[in-house]
Amino acid sequence: MTGAGSGPRLSLEIVRTPEQLADALAVRRTVFVDEQGVPLDEEIDEHDRDPREIADTLHLLGRLEGRAICTGRLDLVRDPAHITRVAVLREHRGRGLGAQLMEALHDEARSRGLRALALNAQLHAIGFYEQLGYRAHGPVFLDAGIEHRAMDREL
Ligand code: COA
């Protein structure tokens, strides 16, 4: 079971405009740059360009009462596609919202005919992804100075 079935319900939207992208990046800046110390120029990458100009990345944005509180991306260039930059604002964690966001990313992947997904998990988040059906494999490696392991699951 994941926490997706209980607690507050996220309002989820596919990021299609620069304004939505700015809301998603604000969540990531709070979580990855301010909280985790990732340099801003490593946090923002080529997948964060104007969403009207890129078809190979899908950003999802989750809101509660209109406020952007979580986000995650689906990188469709890689095979298998990768989930990246999953972040929930600290004050909203532990209520099943990250799981709702992940299930929505899975649904988007399924709707595109994908049969598997992969991600690189920060070590502290491995339990979160295991609850969602992912299994870790391979060695621990550093990305932006943070320890990670590769994980994947079938859809
Ligand atoms: N370790 C083990 N289990 C965890 C966990 C963790 N760090 N975080 C959540 N879980 C479990 C929950 O207990 C819950 O299980 P349950 O359904 O049996 O109760 C399930 O995973 C879903 O948890 P949820 O409340 O939806 O997660 P969240 O909203 O707190 O979001 C993160 C989880 C990891 C996205 C959030 O902690 C976060 O944004 N962290 C900072 C950014 C980050 O590190 N992102 C991951 C980069 S790889």
Image (cartoon, helix red, strand yellow):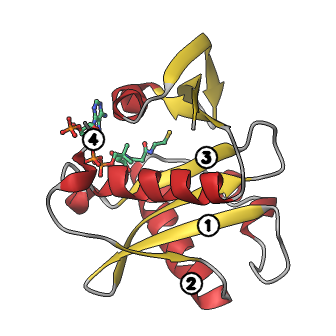
| Res 59 label | 1
Residue nearer the viewer, 55 or 50:
55
Figure check: 138 above or below 141: above
The residue drawn where x is 20% and y is 48% is: 94
Residue farthest left in this picture: 7
Which residue type carries mark 2?
Answer: Gln
Ranked by sequence position, the earlier of labels 2 and 3 is 2
Question: Label 2: how many residues lie within 10 Å, few (<14), some (14-19) or many (20+)?
Answer: some
- Cβ of mark 2 under 8 A from ligand 1: no
Outermost residue toward the top in this view: 139
Residue drawn at the location 16% of the way across and 56% of the way down: 6
Which numbered tag is attached to residue 20?
Answer: 2
Q: Residues within 10 Å of mark 4 (few under 14, many from 20)?
A: some
Image height check: is 27 above or below 137?
A: below
- Which residue type carries mark 3? Ile
Asked whether disc 2 touches disc 4, contact meaning CB atoms under 8 Å apart, the reply is: no
Secondary structure of the residue carrying numbered label 1 = strand
| Disc 4 residue lies near ligand 1 with CB under 8 A | yes
Would you identify the image quadrant in which residue 90 lies?
bottom left
Contact, mark 1 vs mark 2 (Cβ under 8 Å): yes
Give the label on residue 83, or none: 3
Task: Give the CA distance from mark 4 to mark 1.
Answer: 22 Å
Residue 97: percent from left, percent from top: 29, 58
The residue sitting at 53% across, 50% down in the picture is 106
Q: Secondary structure at mark 3?
A: strand
SS category of the residue bearing label 2: helix
Indicate the position of residue 92 as horizontal and vertical percent values. 23, 61
Residues under labels 1 and 2: Cα distance?
Answer: 9 Å
